[in-house]
Image (tube, grey):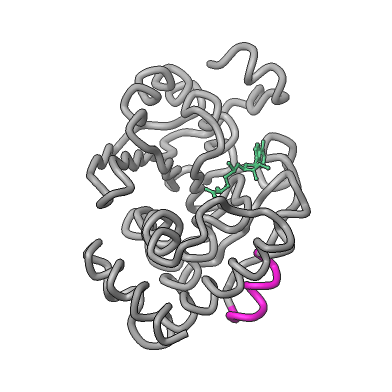
């Protein structure tokens, strides 16, 4: 635990986010690492298992969205899988109320366990993002990492965001190219791109964090069923 914590603190310091591993938050990240590895031995959640790599590629990477989210926001993390960015965000930003959404209920078991163990403000929802009309335009922020290309992802995420809220898309090196493909759809769905933040996350490489403000309501025709979204992106 001590070694784990020291490694996590050193990676966070290198990334310029040491504040997120101070005090109790650091201990929570260390516990999250231990539990992730233990759970991963039984149910595969991640191919990355070495502490330094997990701290960089899962924890610090998840926190690249942290400064894009307003204080006290309600957040839906679309396709959270094993809990990224949900769990690191919930540890680092206890002011957020996060709904961790994934279509595979099995993946949410770990997220739910960790939310309880670490007393995080996280609830889980097993459903497809495009099939939850009861949550339409009800979140301040939608986040998403490694779920789909931007032109498809926007139709999953923007309908869930309130007017005045935002969608924070966590992308890698292909972010700008994906955004060019998605611009038409973003406008149709009521969004306006307000920031494209491109930087390098140490050895994890280029990161592109795209912020889309929800400037007008999403027309009722969207989101369409997944088959249509995929076959004919907006
Ligand atoms: N965000 C996590 C991460 O970065 O480690 C998981 C990424 S994983 C590659 C993609 C996840 O998105 C899977 O767990 C999958 O079940 C989920 N997913 C894909 N399409 C979805 C949809 N339409 N609604 C909800 N979840 C979806």
Boundaries of the magenta span: 111-119
Residue 132 quadrant: top right
Residue 223 to residue 129: above or below:
above
**Residue in the foreground of this view, choosing between 138 and 120:** 120
Q: Residue at x 39, y 38 (%)?
A: 171
Residue found 71% across the figure and 58% down from its top: 108
**Is residue 197 depicted above or below 100 in this figure?**
above
Displayed quadrant of residue 79: top right
Residue 94: x, y in percent?
A: 47, 74
Residue at 58% of width from left, 72% of height from top? 121
Q: Where 31 falls versus 163 (above or below)? A: below
Where is residue 9 drawn, in percent x and y?
32, 75
Residue 36 position within the rendered picture, expressed as x and y whole percent measured from the top left: 59, 67
User: Left or right: 194 with respect to 141?
Assistant: left
Relative horizontal placement of residue 16, taking residue 106 as reference (left or right): left
Question: How many numbered marks does the figure carry?
Answer: 0
Q: Quarter of the picture for ligand 1?
A: top right
């Amino acid at each position: 635990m001590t070694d784990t914590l020291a490694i996590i603190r050193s990676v966070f310091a290198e990334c310029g986010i040491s504040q997120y591993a101070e005090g109790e938050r650091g201990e929570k990240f260390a516990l999250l690492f231990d539990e992730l590895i233990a759970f991963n031995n039984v149910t595969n959640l991640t191919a990355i298992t070495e502490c330094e790599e997990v701290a960089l590629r899962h924890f610090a990477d998840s926190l690249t969205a942290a400064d894009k989210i307003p204080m006290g926001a309600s957040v839906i993390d679309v396709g959270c899988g094993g809990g990224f960015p949900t769990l690191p965000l919930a540890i680092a930003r206890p002011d957020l109320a996060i709904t961790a959404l994934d279509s595979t209920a099995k993946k949410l078991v770990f997220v739910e366990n960790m939310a309880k163990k670490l007393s995080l403000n996280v609830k889980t929802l097993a459903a497809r993002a495009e099939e939850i009309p009861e949550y339409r335009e009800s979140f301040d922020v939608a986040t998403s990492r490694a779920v789909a290309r931007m032109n498809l992802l926007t139709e999953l995420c923007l309908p869930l965001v309130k007017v005045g809220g935002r969608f924070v898309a966590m992308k890698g090196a292909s972010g700008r190219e994906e955004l060019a493909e998605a611009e038409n759809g973003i406008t149709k769905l009521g969004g306006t791109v307000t920031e494209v933040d491109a930087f390098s996350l140490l050895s994890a490489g280029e990161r592109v964090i795209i912020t889309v403000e929800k400037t007008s309501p999403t027309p009722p025709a969207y989101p369409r069923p997944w088959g249509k979204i995929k076959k004919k992106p907006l």
